[in-house]
Image (cartoon, rainbow, N blue to C red):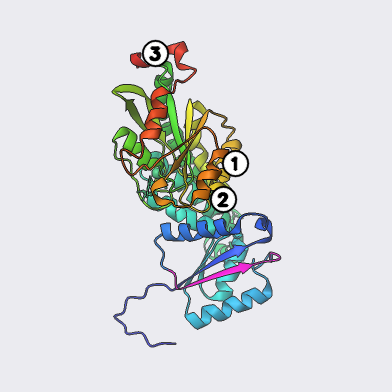
Amino acid sequence: MAHKKFYEPHLPKVMIIGVHAPYNHTKNIDSYFAEFLNLVKANEVAYDDAQFIRLREIDNATFFTKGKVEELIKICKEKGIDHVIVSEPLTSVQERNLTDLLTAKVFDRTALILDIFEKQATTLEGKTQVAIAMLQYKKSRLAGKGVYMSQQAGFIGGRGLGETAKERETRHIENQILKLRRELEHQQEIRKTQRKRRLATGIPMICLVGYTNAGKSTIMNALTKSDVLAEDKLFATLDTTTREMYIDHHKKGVLIDTVGFIQFLPPQLIDAFKSTLSELQYADLLLHVVDISDPNWESHIEAVLRILADLEVEKEMLFVFNKVDQIDNIDVVKDIHKYLPHVVISARSKDGIQPLVKFLAQWQPSRVAEHATIQDL
Ligand SMILES: Nc1nc2c(ncn2[C@@H]2O[C@H](COP(=O)(O)OP(=O)(O)OP(=O)(O)O)[C@@H](O)[C@H]2O)c(=O)[nH]1
Ligand SMILES: [Mg+2]
């Protein structure tokens, strides 16, 4: 082992492992790996080694099959790896066994996404949702700690209650979750009241949806001149953000920015974040923003449509093909004609966004006529 001077700061050496698992053999694996690398980047992790592994089967105890584990042990040893990030969700048992075998801390897909969510959540509602998701994850990880925790109970918890430390810890987490859920309900009540007020006045609701990093917040800023965070990172927006939108000096409605979608969001996260997307149920129009400069833009569209179907959201939709300034591939232009209606824009400049402005200027929600005219809003 290389000699380390005592004053050298020790940054953990990180290995990332992208897995082509049997359960996603039929999926577009390039786009899946690209997304994994983006997740790592969004987490501001610099890695020292990247492995891409195709697995024919999953081992219940170690996730990777025996031969693969041996290869990984060798690499970890040779490169002095401290942290391993796996592109897949692992069970708590698999995570612990791998941690032991690789003598490195192992993080799975859920931990990776949770970490990003935690860093990025800004509003109270977003923070509460992330805190709940984190606690649920922590609770699920307790399941693998059976022996260690009950041994502990022998020393500190055995006062006739027959309760193990694990049970106590689980109960403690459940209580915390319950408390946070109550807080979240309260925060959501406030949002509901605001939404009711909007519905009562018949103000059209236009929601920006789309894959993470597609440019939703940039469009929001351009259309409303607000300063919703726009960053070249995944999940820059973790809360719905609502702004009034004026077109040609007339209030056209409210524009709502939403959290970006990704493929295969771990199930615990879908639940926690569903309420963030509840606004979509009341939308009059969805602006489905697509980054056409991303080679995987079509699989991103599929991922978003799948999640919308899961949420049972069926709304009028405009495909907004964004970042046209970054493409020179003419085939893309041909392919987008499958997706109608659509506009092609570049949200970076005022001129570039004009096709969308034009569409919105002539767009009328069917529902508004029953309540009010646009001028009344
Ligand atoms: N070249 C180019 N870059 C753009 C365009 N629109 C947005 N971007 C950049 O793309 C990155 C992501 O933009 P955001 O607006 O944060 O994307 P988002 O869809 O809100 O992302 P999440 O909130 O993470 O889901 C930023 O660096 C933007 O500056 C565009 O038309 N052209
Ligand atoms: Mg955003």
In the rendered structure, are the residues bearing label 2 and label 1 in contact, judged by CB atoms less than 8 Å apart?
no
Is residue 48 within the magenta segment?
Answer: yes
Can you tell which of label 1 and label 3 is closer to the viewer?
A: 3
Q: CA distance from mark 1 to mark 3?
A: 34 Å
Q: Is residue 74 above or below residue 165?
A: below
Looking at the image, tell me whether mark 2 or mark 3 is earlier in sequence order. 2
Q: Which residues are magenta?
A: 47-58
Could you tell me which quadrant the C terminus lies in?
top left
In this rendering, does residue 209 appear at all? Answer: yes
Residue at the disc numbered 3: 373
The residue under label 2 is which amino acid type?
Pro
Q: Is residue 173 visible?
A: no
Q: Residue furthest right?
A: 57
Q: Nearer the viewer, residue 292 or 151?
A: 292
- Residue 249: x %, y % from top left: 28, 23
Residue 364 is inside the magenta segment: no
Kindly identify the residue that appears in the image at 51 percent across and 43 percent down. 272
Circle 1 residue: 306
**Dot placed on the residue nearer the N-terminal end, 2 or 1:** 2
The earlier-in-sequence mark between 1 and 3 is: 1
Circles 1 and 3, Cβ within 8 Å, touching? The answer is no
Residue 153: image x %, image y %? 56, 62
- The image shows a total of numbered marks equal to 3
Circle 1 — which element?
helix
User: Which residue is identified by label 2?
Assistant: 266
Amino acid under disc 3: Thr
